[in-house]
């Protein structure tokens, strides 16, 4: 297959043309992998794939991860079906985050396949965390170089309780995760500003929440500057894959009254703490 990569914005993201995800050979996969490392998020339009084919493509990237709270499809427990119905007001993933940062082994990557989308709305935003780090001043880079963050997601306290009935009981209690605030990417080794929204990245290790908040809030706002982002408008059929090691994302909740259904698989990452 001859692939073409078309950048989605100046900051990140690329559409890959020329790939049929039902049948990817090793050489084509190596090219796709390289494009991912260069663009952080890739997507393929007009893919007509079954859950088994989606899973087979996901396994090319690594071992699928089982979400502690979200149940999978009965025949494919690795695939989470994210559904927002017309009467729902909450959307899954509606704040800037990187997946499973609340665990010691956050996801390496996430794959989202659009099954049903509203005519307008429900786009996903992505942010390049390499650019966010690079744009900091030398003084700020020096100040945060050795800081570590305390990350915890307590489902019982979180707003996800509005998804009650859709969540499963985790097998073990939530375990806090400590991550470097500046985290080298596992493959490129380039530094990334590694941060999540405030109910997950709660404070800096050895600092109180009150001391941490002004700095973390500043860095969170900085990391979402529009010039570090791209926006993916869905239609039925595209499959996107992003690199959680250097990309954050957020689902837009601007389509009340319509239904949106996505099939998501996350790939297990490495332990950093
Ligand atoms: C997610 O956070 O993985 C969901 C993103 C989306 O549904 O657009």
Image (cartoon, rainbow, N blue to C red):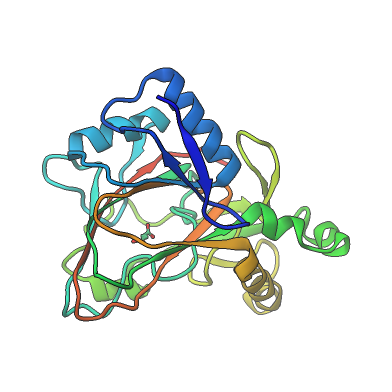
Whether residue 111 appears in this view of the structure is no
Query: How far across and how far down the image is residue 219, in percent?
Result: 67, 69
Query: How far across and how far down the image is residue 215, in percent?
Result: 71, 73
Residue 240 against residue 202 in the figure, above or below:
above
Tally of numbered tags? 0
Q: Work out whether residue 5 or residue 21 is closer to the camera in this orientation and state it.
A: 5
* Residue at screen point 31% across, 49% down: 238
Tell me: 125 left or right of 120: right
Tell me: 81 left or right of 129: left
Say which quarter of the image contains residue 228: bottom right
Query: How far across and how far down the image is residue 166, in percent?
Result: 19, 64
Whether residue 19 appears in this view of the structure is yes
Query: How far across and how far down the image is residue 84, in percent?
Result: 22, 69
* Residue at screen point 31% across, 71% down: 91
Quarter for ligand 1?
A: bottom left
Residue 266 against residue 114 in the figure, above or below:
above
The C terminus, quarter of image: top right
Q: Work out whether residue 72 or residue 124 is closer to the camera in this orientation and state it.
A: 124
Q: Work out whether residue 211 or residue 13 is closer to the camera in this orientation and state it.
A: 13
The N terminus, quarter of image: top left
Q: Residue furthest right?
A: 139
Tell me: 94 left or right of 117: right
* Residue at screen point 51% across, 40% down: 5
């Amino acid at each position: 297959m001859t692939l073409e990569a078309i950048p989605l914005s100046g900051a990140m993201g690329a559409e890959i043309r020329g790939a049929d995800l039902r049948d990817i050979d090793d050489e084509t996969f190596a090219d796709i992998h390289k494009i991912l490392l260069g663009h952080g998020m890739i997507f393929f339009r007009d893919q007509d794939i079954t859950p088994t084919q989606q899973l087979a493509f996901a396994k090319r990237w690594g071992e699928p991860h089982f979400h502690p709270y979200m149940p999978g499809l009965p025949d494919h427990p690795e695939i989470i079906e994210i559904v927002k119905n017309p009467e729902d007001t909450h959307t899954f993933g509606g704040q800037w985050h990187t997946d499973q940062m609340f665990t010691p082994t956050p996801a390496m990557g996430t794959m989202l396949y659009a099954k049903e989308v509203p005519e307008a709305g429900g786009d996903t935003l992505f942010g390049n965390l390499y650019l966010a780090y690079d744009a900091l001043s030398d003084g700020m880079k020096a100040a945060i170089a050795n800081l570590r963050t305390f990350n915890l997601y307590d489902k019982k306290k979180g707003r996800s309780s509005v998804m009650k009935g859709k969540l499963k009981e985790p097998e073990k209690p939530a375990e806090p995760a400590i991550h470097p605030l500046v985290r080298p990417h596992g493959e490129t080794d380039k530094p990334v500003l590694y941060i999540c929204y405030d109910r997950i990245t709660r404070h800096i290790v050895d600092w109180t929440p009150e001391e941490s908040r002004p700095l973390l809030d500043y860095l969170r706002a900085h990391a979402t500057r529009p010039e570090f982002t791209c926006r993916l408008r869905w239609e039925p059929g595209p499959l996107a894959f992003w690199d959680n090691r250097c990309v954050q994302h957020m689902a837009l909740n601007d389509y009340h009254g319509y239904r949106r259904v996505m099939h998501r698989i996350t790939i297990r990452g490495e332990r950093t703490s």
